[in-house]
Amino acid sequence: MNILIILYYYRPHYSGLTIYAERLARALAARGNKVTVLTSQFDKSLARHEIVDGVEIVREPVAFHISKGPIIPSFLPTAWKLMREADVVNLHLPQLDAAPISMLARLQRKPVVLTYQCDLVLPEGFVNRLANLASDTANFVSASAAHMIVNTSWDYAKRSRFLSKYFDKVRVVDAPVVLPQVTDKEVRAFKLKYDVQADEQIIGMVARLAAEKGVEHLARALPQVLETYPKARVLYVGPYENVFGEEQYAEMLAPIIANLGEHWQFLGIISDEELAAFFHSCNLVVLPSTNSTEALGLVQVEAMTCGTPSVASDLPGLRQPVLTTGMGEIFAMGNASALAQAIIKVLGSPDEYKGDVPAIKARFAPDAAAASYEDLFRELTD
């Protein structure tokens, strides 16, 4: 099957959306499909065209940005050209060009499957309000043209201000999750590198330093945790410096985190191998996200595949990995005290949060997600 996947950002861009798309594309290619990804050349040093892990990647130059959305003049002509050879078009939303691309696909009588990653919620401001309006319009047009819409949970789909309007088109597919296998030696090397001591309680967080991730709630919860566990420490993985559009948020956070001293450490972006060792080194991971831009939280499933529990905000979709596996606790979104109590509870009773790790790995395996997508594609192409 010839599958065309279209999204604004693809790897090496770092986000849950791009990681999801990369894993799906690789798994579909590994199953014998011809997979092409059309995306932006968000970094001018990236190749315009290359093949990685069996996936053909076509990158179009970015002229400028509106809020976080890239403006790519050549995107639509290239999409029109590539979809001529495609059996099915898979669009990952949110993206502004989804509306015209979905209409172009219908003109070519190509099945359109949307992968709806999340509702877009941008910060306050006139430009962001316009961007939100444009994104909503693009979503509604593309959903009207689409044959199917994929999401990661019914919990999120039922409560999404967008998906709830197109519920008859929604199909649920578990997100693709995989990490490299690491040895005890590699985990010990990670702990040595970041000075992780045997008597410490390591609280992990993996995210861009962005307002919707709720980083401030973890920073404000930590002093309460330290009253019970004075050797607790946060290890924070992900981009944290010069994150586009988050400069004011980082400035607000800086003094709060500085006051935590040695109990908070930024690691930056690390390799997949180190990420797996990181999860094995943590006592738990935290997802204190604050709005519907977080629909699942891939990192908590990644942690669970390593046997590490999660503490997550009680948000639609985001709470599902904890509720369905029993590996963690959920807390009232935005409540730092409730977050601290949940962390203390998990740290105090680790044996209560050991789930069926092999079953979790099998459920979220990229090959399982790719097989589910193939079933949807065949249903449409047949």
Image (cartoon, rainbow, N blue to C red):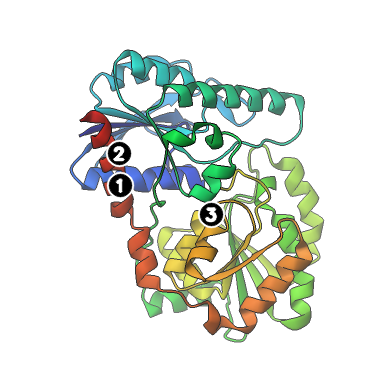
The residue singled out by tag 1 in the image is: 372
Labels 3 & 1 near each other (Cβ < 8 A): no
Extreme residue toward the left, this view: 32
Labels 2 & 1 near each other (Cβ < 8 A): yes
The residue singled out by tag 3 in the image is: 297
Disc 1 element: helix
| Of 238 and 374, the residue lying toward us | 374
Occupied quadrant, residue 2: top left
Horizontally, residue 357 falls left or right of residue 335, namely left
Instruction: Indicate the position of residue 245 as horizontal and vertical percent values.
Output: 67, 37
Q: Upstream in the sequence, badge 3 or badge 1?
A: 3
Extreme residue toward the front, this view: 168
Amino acid on which the number 1 mark rests in the picture = Ser
What residue appears at the point 50 percent right and 41 percent down from the top-left corner? 117
CA gap, disc 3 and disc 1: 20 Å
Amino acid on which the number 2 mark rests in the picture = Leu
| Of 270 and 17, the residue lying toward us | 17
CA gap, disc 2 and disc 1: 7 Å
The residue singled out by tag 2 in the image is: 376
